[in-house]
Image (cartoon, grey):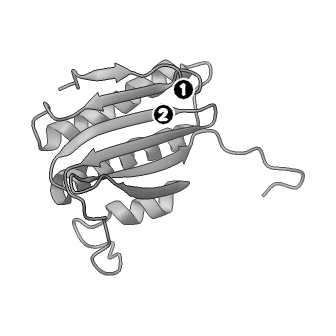
Amino acid sequence: MTIAHGKEIRGRGHGRSLRYDLTGVPPGPGVVAACREATRRALNSWFGPADAPDTRAVADALLLVSEVVTNAHTHGGVPSELRLDGTDRALWVQVSDTDPHRPRPHGPHRAYRSSGHGLYLLQRLAARWGTVPRGPDGKTVWFQVDLFPEASGPGGS
């Protein structure tokens, strides 16, 4: 399944912005896979093989897209929009949904559980993340993944 409603947004940064309307995508695992594939296509288009980002950072970004869209579907009502913004060094992802409540962990992280890892992964893998209210109609969860690690100075870091 692909997201048929992708719209490229011009005029910001280096033209590396895409917005996908998710309201027509059937809820469930299909929307998660579609968002993950849209992110993979955007990264390939924006950076290509010659300028490819760090593979670990790309894997982290794709995992976090999956987690945030899954959380929106499972806990946040209906995912309504995916927005991707690429800079020279980072990927910004925004996932909007129809639930105005901020995500919060339900107790401490427990690795042995079959679910409940999304916010923990955001805290561990994203350079930054947060939420923005959208009034009574929902919220946007956003995160940033640094695609190109900073060069370490003399002596390493």
Q: Residue at x 15, y 43 (%)?
A: 29
Q: Quadrant of the N terminus?
A: top left
Task: Look at mark 2 in the image and give the residue it sits on.
Answer: 85
Q: Residue at x 30, y 81 (%)?
A: 107
Viewer-side label of 2, 1: 1
Q: With 84 as the anchor, is 46 left or right in this view?
A: right
Percent of width and height locating residue 125: 49, 56
Q: With 2 as the anchor, is 155 left or right in this view?
A: right
Q: Residue at x 11, y 42 (%)?
A: 27
32, above or below 12, in the image = below
Q: Quadrant of the C terminus?
A: bottom right
Q: With 103 as the anchor, is 1 left or right in this view?
A: left
Residue type beneath disc 2: Asp
Do residues under tags 2 and 1 come within 8 Å of each other at their CB atoms?
yes
Task: Look at mark 1 in the image and give the residue it sits on.
Answer: 12
Mark 1 residue crowding within 10 angstroms, few (<14) / some (14–19) / many (20+): few
Element assignment for label 2 = strand
Percent of width and height locating residue 62: 39, 41
46, above or below 66, in the image = above
Q: Residue furthest right?
A: 154
Percent of width and height locating residue 124: 49, 62
Query: Depth check: 55 or 32 in front?
Result: 32
Percent of width and height locating residue 35: 29, 35
75, above or below 111, in the image = above
24, above or below 134, in the image = above
Q: Residue at x 22, y 57 (%)?
A: 136
Q: Residue furthest front?
A: 135
Mark 2 residue crowding within 10 angstroms, few (<14) / some (14–19) / many (20+): many
Q: Marks 2 and 1, Cα distance to the nearest angstrom?
A: 9 Å
Query: Depth check: 39 or 154 in front?
Result: 39
Which of marks 1 and 2 precedes in the sequence?
1
